Image: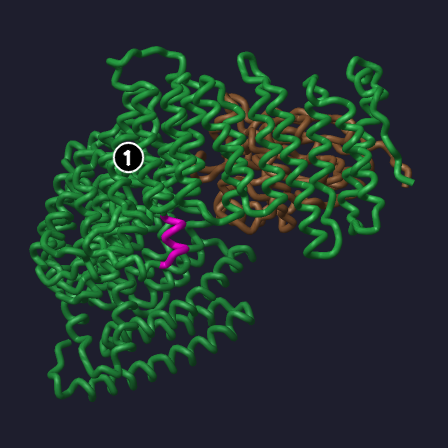
Amino acid sequence: MVLVLALGDLHIPHRAPDLPAKFKSMLVPGKIQHIISPGNLCIKEVHDYLKSLCPDLHVTRGEYDEDLRYPESEQLKIGEFKLGICHGHQVIPWGDLDSLAMLQRQLDVDILITGHTHQFKAYKHEGGVIINPGSATGAYSSISYDINPSFVLMDIDGLRVVVYVYELIDGEVKVDKIDFKKPQTAA
Amino acid sequence: MQAPVQDAITVAEEQEKWLADAMALVQHHAFFMHRALDANNLRDALKFSAQMLSELRTSKLSPQKYYELYMRTFDELRKLEIFFKDETKRGRTNADLYELVQHAGNILPRLYLLCTVASVYIKSKEAPAKDILKDLVEMSRGVQHPVRGLFLRSYLSQISRDKLPDIGSEYEGRLVSLRNTYIKSGDAVSAKLLHCKFSRLQGPAREKERREKERRELRDLVGKNLHVLSQLEGVDLDMYKDVVLPRVLEQVVNCKDEIAQYYLMDCIIQVFPDDYHLQTLETLLGACPQLQPTVDVKTVMSQLMERLSNYAASSSEVLPDLLHVEAFAKLSSAVVKVIEAQPDMPLVGAVSLHVALLTFTLRVHVDRLDYVDQVLGACVKKLEGKGKVKDSKATKQIVALLSAPLEKYNDVVTVLRLTNYSKVMEHLDYETNKVMAVVIIQSIMKNNTSISSSEKVDALFELLKELIKDSEGAPSMDEIDEDDFMEEQNLVARLVHMLVNKDHEEMFKILTTARKHFGQGGPKRLKFTLPPLIFAALKLVRCLQGHDAGDEALVSPKKIFQFLHQTVEALSTVPAPELALRLYLQCAEAASDCSLEPVAYEFFTQAFLLYEEEIADSRAQVTAMQLIIGTLQRTYVFGVENRDTLTHKATGYSAKLLKKPDQCRAVYACSHLFWLEEDGGTQDGERVLLCLKRALRIANAAQQMSSVTRGSSGPLTLFVEILNKYLYYFEKGIPQVTSNLIQGLLELIGTELQSENTAQDRAVDAFFASTRRYIQFQKQKGDDLAERYSSIQVVSPP
């Protein structure tokens, strides 16, 4: 069982001072094997903090990220799953699931992690799964109103991934879970 | 006991010799005593111990030498005590022992032995402790010699320490008179001792360490005596107030020895109960200015204040007493007096006194902000005219002074009410001031304190001014470490999110006040401090959206957009054009959501102007176009003309991006500008197709260029992307995007992939394969969409 944390669009310090305290107390170093962030952290301190939780950190560039060296997109393999990361401001219309599905086909990945809209989404389609972990700080977005802070933890086990989404609603952390199974592909 | 100075050395040598002789004898007698103990021979043990104790009858030794002899003998007596205990287990009664030891010839050895037995006797409870002790105290009166008497009493107090009986009323009378005698004699002894011995302890520097050691041992002994004094019943408050304290203080002041004074003051404070101190506060404090200037009076006073604050914390009934004796007033005037009495006191001492007083005030009178402010004010007076304090120790104390209220109240807003706080802060040098400012911000962040009015913002930013703007004393920008600077400014940025108030008018005032302060920060700070303000303002706009407050209202979306416009403009002149462009687009979308067409148009104009004039880097241009197109695609507020102008600009710039692939992608992204999903949005299939066709042409040109320059056609990925776009619009039902077009493109790509000229590209193969899979999937779904897909044949590669 491999734990992958996906969180993005923190927008620290422009739109939020810090991660919510309740999230911070849950995120403990040493428990997570990989961290994936679609981007918009935005400063080095946040990068360093995430790195302290887990050294295997993958970040793609959001339009407000201070570090210009993050790639526009990235692909990696974890267990049986191919994952792709892209912030999503490059895909127009923003948040449009069909256009994101096109990106997924282009990257040839089973799971696409994306952001930009600050709204949690887990969308299963013919080509795979698109996951938007939302904004971990509940930052302001011109696209979405009334955002709750949220992030996603994926438990990858063989051909199965369980997606846990953590949302901070009225001061309490609520958890939901979604199951996905990857079909056995002929070689 | 006073010897002339020139004989001092001979006297010291003499003392050494006498002591050595006495110690040898003690050792000799102790050896035989041990032999007797091992043989269980009580009679011999007593005989030899009495001989050993006779050495203590000497008058020749000075007190410090006597002390050494005493300690040696003391160790031996411990062993004797253990033997006595074992004796009683073997059947000998304590009463027996008590009787036996009295056969010793001389009074001093006899008394020491009696005390030793008494230790065991009392523990056994065979007789009442009161009786035994009474007996002993009576008999001790017989030893009048100051030094011998002092040590004997010390031994007695040691063995009876935890066994002093409670006052039973029948005893009160008898015991009181006994105690009085004890006190008086003990008192006289200690007085004489202090007077003579400390003054004798001068001498050559190399002996200094030895002297210090002797001084310490001596004062330990006197301290112990005081300790016993304090534990005696019968020393009640009145006796303490009228007799004991004044006399002891008199001796302390007169002895003029700094180590002794310090230790004894400390003793007095630690040893006597708190309510005694409370009632004698003025007397006690009155001695402080009279102490030697080298005495660490601040520690003495802070120990006293700490005891009193612990006392106050121990129970709520104590507080009225503290108020009644006006503890605070007395302490603060004592501080003033001490500082006045010692004009040469270094700054660090004066400030630490204030720190101690502040600690007391915060513990005892935590609600009295006026007291706290008063203490700070007194410190300000002391610091007046000194400018920025350079001494690092004094600076540390000032920082302690400033940190104490922060830690106590955990609420910067309360601290802001202390009018003298900022004045104290002004005396910190530049670096320390910044450190303090950072501490203040961290306190706000940690405690989630809201700064909820523009006045509070003003007060707070006054404290933080070294962070927020350049002052005269500050080093120039080149000398400042960049990473540190960024960290500080990011911290200030985070602070902005704490400036909140649910009332919209007040919130707007807060924003404008903060903006005013940040505006003085200079170009390097603006790109850190202004963006959070802008997002805070956008959040406020959202709150007001939909409420029509009318033009008379103090705050409205329109007014906020004016504020936003000026603020983003300031950023573009920093220069920070990319950041400003993004923020203009944020404002544009927000204005569109508020249905303010001219405002939204203005923001888009500014964004385009920045793009044209300031953004030259090709990669930055690509992202900028993505953002412009993405935002424009979501805005519904524009009428036909405005929309056309903006769309035309967007597509024009898209086609002019430097690299062909970027051009291609931007152009097909523009296709979405002509197909808005929501009601009332433009849906122009012709223009969509035009964009897609243009994108295809660009892709073709890119292919040809690639084959000319590199000898092979470039990757076909652009074609596959455009194919996917065709599918997107096909599914939306745009009539202009026909299945023929799609079929044509499918075949084109298929052919190209198989051509020799094409470089192998796994990514493109995979992309094309997954696209074909998608089409197959759609065909098999069996719904209306599948119907439309039916005419499309998917060609599988060989």
The answer to which image quadrant residue A118 occupies is top right
Position of B788 compared to B38: left or right?
A: right
Q: Which amino acid does label 1 sit on?
A: Ala
Q: Residue B171 lies in what quarter of the image?
A: top left
The residue located at (35%, 71%) in the rendering is B53
Colour in which chain A is drawn: brown
Magenta stretch bounds: B481-488
Is residue B542 shown above or below B746? above
Provide the letter of the chain coloured green: B
Mark 1, chain letter? B
Residue B420 versus residue A168: which sits nearer the camera?
A: A168
Mark 1 burial class by Cα count in 10 Å: few <14, some 14-19, many 20+: many
Q: Please identify the dominant SS of the magenta region.
A: helix
Residue B364 in sight here? no
Place of residue B446 in the rendered image (x, y in percent of width and height, measured from the top left): 41, 38
> Is residue B487 covered in magenta?
yes
Residue B556 lies, with reference to residue B277, above or below; the image says: above
Could you tell me which residue is drawn at 20 percent across and 55 percent down? B298
Q: Which type of secondary structure does the marked residue at label 1 adopt?
A: helix
Q: Where is residue B327 in the image (x, y as percent from the top left)?
A: 16, 39
Q: Residue at x 53, y 26 (%)?
A: B633
* Closest to the observer, B330 or B552: B552
- Residue B43, how many percent across, how many down? 47, 69
Identify residue for label 1: B514
